[in-house]
Image (cartoon, rainbow, N blue to C red):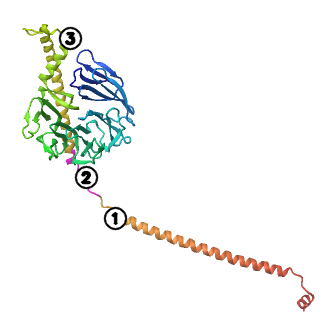
Amino acid sequence: MIIEVDHPKFSAVELRGGALMVHCMQGEPRVLRENVQDVAVTVQGSLLRIAAFMNQDYAWFLSGEEELSSERVELGEPYGGGGRLINDGLGNSHLFYFVRQSPGSSSLLRHQRFTEQWSKAQTVSANVFGEPWGFSVTWHTDQYLHLAYLAHKDQRLLYRVYDLEHGLWSGAVAFSGECCSYPQFISAGELYLFWLEELEKTTLKVKQKAEHWSESITLSSGEQHAAVVGYACADKEWSVLWGEGSHFYQASFGQWKQPQQVERGDFEYVWRVQGGLTIPTYKGKKEVQVEAVREEVSAEKPPEPEEQVQHTEPDPELERVRRRREAEQAQAQAAFMEQAFRTLKEWESLKEEVRRWQQELKPQPPLDLTPLTSRLERLERRFLSWQRAQEEEKRQGAASVAQLERELFRLRARLEELEQQNTKPRGFWQRFLSRV
């Protein structure tokens, strides 16, 4: 991953195979950190600021104009993806990232603010859809931070603002109740929010904020799925670009009803820090080639004194480098276009097949379970009656046994009494009368 920056000393920040590198205007790239999982970049004036996320409960914050100092930032919990680093208009930086609520569940979106030191982590919202493309945040001239993110359960598009003075986030407002993806803020005079919405076809939509947010406007035609959305800024004029099937469109901000069909091969897709915010950008192919030639020539040839840098004829070395770069760019662009269109076609075919399955799949009619439930109820009543009869018989039997035991006890007492009477000695008159 390469993120281009507009800085007098550095041209880009790259994360390659866990190695975090910074590309200088002159010289070879420098390795800043190893074993880095994710990176976020912004530029504050002449300061380059980088957040390097490890697979730990902390990150490294690097900042400087030429030499980058390093500072450890405590996250509190293991990093869960989605790192963003943006600037506000007051010289502060803001760090956003996910932490997992539990394995396989939704995420917590956290926010930390850097003035002279980092604040403690603040939870913006729970139950957030925890994919890196699932939220966007930016600073606007109304002195607020604006956040758009997706709910975990149904991917509804939600919106909040942050008051820097009080350090509080507002409640959530629903911007769309449909399944959404790839929200992206662009602050260009007014504030714009773009996102993709899953309807019958994937559509590109936008909201625009002057004093209040406008109603959502659909940019794509709806005939094919909208995809590969990016943004371009040329001479301070912003436009949005997107693909629909094999076609590619560009619409200037505010002129939503007048999109122009352009050639995808005329643009290169890059990540770039623009206005303190890292956004997906489409750059014209000629612009890319000029920048590449300028960087390669400056790296291969030392700068000459001003009085010697006057040529009446084209520099053969510059022409050679330019032709070689054009050939490489053309080859890479062709391979990229072939892969992109193949992937887009496969994705559209898959979505059409899934939609066809959903239409053809008819659920079985529900079974009538009334006879079975009636029979079960009858059996249950008979079982309860039998159980009660058994309990009554058991109770009566226990009473009979108790009565019999009492009778036996009285009989045994009577027998003992009679036995005692027979064992007593008889008197004279008893013996005499018994003989008579």
Residue 190 appears left or right of 27: left
What amino acid type should be assigned to the residue bearing mark 3?
A: Glu
Residue 88 appears left or right of 404: left
In the rendered image, which quarter contains the C terminus? bottom right
**Residue 14, position in %: x, y?**
27, 24
Residue 25 appears left or right of 57: left
Residue mark closest to the camera, 3 vs 1: 3
Q: Residue at x 53, y 70 (%)?
A: 391
Residue mark closest to the camera, 2 vs 3: 3
Residue 166 sits above or below residue 250 on the image: below
Label drawn at residue 166:
none
Label 2: which residue?
363
Q: Could you tell me what secondary structure mostly forms the magenta stretch?
A: loop
- Taking the view exactly as shown, the residue that stands out farthest to the bottom is 436
Callout 1: SS? helix
**Residue 340, position in %: x, y?**
18, 29
What amino acid type should be assigned to the residue bearing mark 1?
A: Pro
In the rendered image, which quarter contains the N terminus? top left
What amino acid type should be assigned to the residue bearing mark 2?
A: Pro
Q: Mark 2 or mark 3: name the one nearer the start of the chain.
A: 3
Label 1: which residue?
371
Q: How much space separates mark 3 and mark 1, taking CA atoms?
A: 89 Å
Q: What are the residue bounds of the magenta stretch?
A: 357-366
Q: Nearer the viewer, residue 422 or 332?
A: 332
Task: Look at the numbered discs 3 and 1 and tell me whether their residues touch, using CB distance below 8 Å.
Answer: no
Residue 107 makes an appearance in the image: no
Q: How much space separates mark 2 and mark 3, taking CA atoms?
A: 68 Å
Magenta segment: does it hold 361?
A: yes
- Taking the view exactly as shown, the residue that stands out farthest to the right is 428
Label 3: which residue?
300
> Dot 2: few (<14), some (14–19), or many (≥20) neighbours within 10 Å?
few
Callout 2: SS? loop
